[in-house]
């Protein structure tokens, strides 16, 4: 909640600079629910990008969720609307939580994942709405506010380190990220993820061979 609400407020305030009604930010949080993509949409709408450009850019940015989805196939065993909502609501933050925490007591695992997903979206909706309303009522200085997304990812990094306490995955992530920035700046995220996956697969195969 303390991550989603401030981040959603930052989005809502920045979104109001576009001149749309405040409730458009709430609708984006409800039907899009993609923090990074929604922040990117602000820039695309400001530049008056076409529908095709918006669609391609959003697909490229959110394609990282393909890798997230593959890694939770064994966890998401719900069916019907429950599974559809779990797929729709899989964000970076939700992924971080479901892979680093476990249900307590006799709580059903699928209900646990569903609760986390629904709560995260509700926090995001509250933040988007509060920010949009505040932005529509006051003239706020939005300089530097887009750093909120980076700050949230840093918090997720710290939480993962606290849980895992293994240097290797973080070293691979840093190496992959730097490689993507230096050699493939335009597609940095996809290249970094692909590089990390290849290295981890090779490490897994090597450890299996030694065993």
Image (cartoon, grey):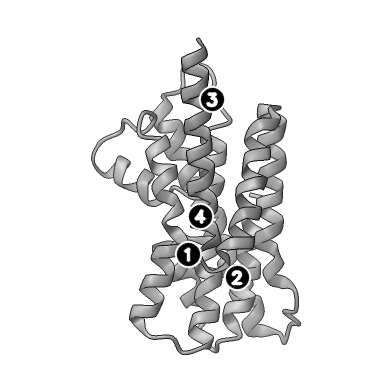
CA–CA distance between discs 1 and 4?
28 Å
Callout 3 secondary element: loop
Pinpoint residue 167: horizontal percent, then vertical percent.
70, 31
CA–CA distance between discs 4 and 3?
31 Å
Marked residue nearer the N-terminal end (2 or 1): 2
| Residue for badge 4 | 191
Q: Are marks 2 and 1 in contact (CB under 8 Å)?
A: yes
Q: Residue at x 61, y 85 (%)?
A: 17
Horizontal arrangement in the rendering, residue 3 relative to residue 86 (left or right): right
Q: Are marks 1 and 4 in contact (CB under 8 Å)?
A: no
Crowding near the residue tagged with mark 4, few <14, some 14–19, many ≥20 C-alpha atoms within 10 Å: some
| Residue for badge 2 | 11
CA–CA distance between discs 4 and 2?
27 Å
| Marker count (numbered) | 4
Pinpoint residue 207: horizontal percent, then vertical percent.
52, 19
Asked whether residue 96 appears in the rendered view, the answer is yes
Pinpoint residue 211: horizontal percent, then vertical percent.
50, 10
Asked whether residue 6 appears in the rendered view, the answer is no
Marked residue nearer the N-terminal end (1 or 3): 1
Marked residue nearer the N-terminal end (1 or 4): 1
| Residue for badge 1 | 29
Crowding near the residue tagged with mark 1, few <14, some 14–19, many ≥20 C-alpha atoms within 10 Å: many
Q: Residue 102, labelled with which disc? A: 3
Pinpoint residue 90: horizontal percent, then vertical percent.
44, 47
Callout 1 secondary element: helix
Classify residue 171 by image quadrant. top right
Up/down of 129 relative to 98, above or below: below
Callout 4 secondary element: helix
Marked residue nearer the N-terminal end (4 or 2): 2
């Amino acid at each position: 909640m303390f991550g989603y609400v401030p981040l959603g407020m930052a989005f809502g305030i920045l979104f109001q600079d576009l001149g749309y009604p405040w409730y458009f930010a709430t609708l984006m949080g409800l039907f899009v629910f993609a923090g990074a993509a929604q922040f990117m949409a602000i820039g695309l709408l400001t530049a008056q990008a076409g529908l095709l450009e918006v669609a391609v850019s959003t697909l490229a940015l959110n394609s990282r969720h393909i890798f997230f989805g593959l890694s939770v196939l064994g966890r998401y065993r719900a069916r019907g609307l429950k599974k559809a909502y779990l797929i729709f609501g899989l964000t970076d933050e939700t992924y971080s939580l479901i892979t680093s925490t476990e249900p307590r007591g006799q709580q059903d695992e699928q209900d646990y994942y569903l609760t986390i997903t629904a709560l995260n979206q509700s926090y995001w909706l509250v933040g988007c709405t509060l920010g949009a309303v505040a932005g529509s009522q006051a003239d706020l200085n939005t300089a530097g506010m887009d750093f909120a997304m980076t700050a949230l990812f840093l918090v997720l990094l710290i939480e993962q380190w606290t849980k895992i306490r293994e240097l290797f995955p973080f070293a691979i992530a840093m190496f992959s990220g730097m490689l993507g920035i230096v050699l493939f700046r335009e597609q940095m995220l996809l290249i970094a993820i692909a590089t990390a996956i290849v290295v981890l697969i090779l490490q897994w195969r090597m450890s299996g061979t030694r065993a």
